[in-house]
Amino acid sequence: MRVNLITQPFYNAKSVKGKILLSLTIRAASGFPGEYQVPTDSKTLMRLLRQNTHLPARMLERFEGKLVAPVGARLMGVELGDSTLTKIGYFID
């Protein structure tokens, strides 16, 4: 399923060494209504993307660099399998 991934950092939360605490929003890229939000951290999210997508390393590095930006980072039209989305908590009907 193609999804849009949008992050926003939690500025009031304590960051663990090397990890940025994030709110991850998942939206269907096809324009279907609805979205899912889940708390995560930068290391967990990047590990998930590296292991479960075929995105070029350069694209992932740019995305990772934007995770600390006040407006967050966005990856649009990312292909994620149903099992990966289920692991995140985004259930597919």
Image: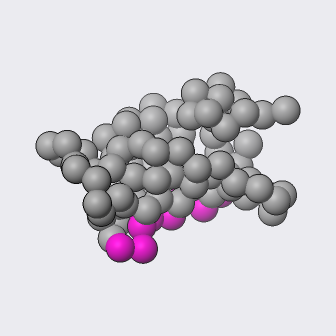
Q: Is residue 17 above or below residue 84?
A: below
Residue 17 x %, y % = 14, 43
Count all numbered tags in the image, as a single digit. Answer: 0
Q: Residue furthest left?
A: 17
Residue 85 x %, y % = 64, 35
Q: Is residue 44 above or below residue 58?
A: above
Q: Tell me what residue is drawn at x 30 percent, y 63 percent.
A: 11
Q: Which residues are magenta?
A: 70-77
Q: Is residue 85 left or right of residue 75?
A: right
Q: Is residue 82 above or below residue 54?
A: above
Tell me, yes or no, whether the highlighted magenta stretch contains residue 61: no
Q: Tell me what residue is drawn at x 22 percent, y 50 percent.
A: 14
Residue 73 can be seen in this image: yes
Instruction: Indicate the quadrant containing the N terminus: top left, top right, bottom left or bottom right.
Output: top right
Q: Is residue 27 left or right of residue 51?
A: right
Residue 65 can be seen in this image: no
Instruction: Indicate the quadrant containing the C terminus: top left, top right, bottom left or bottom right.
Output: top right
Residue 51 x %, y % = 45, 32
Front in this rendered view, residue 89 or 11: 11
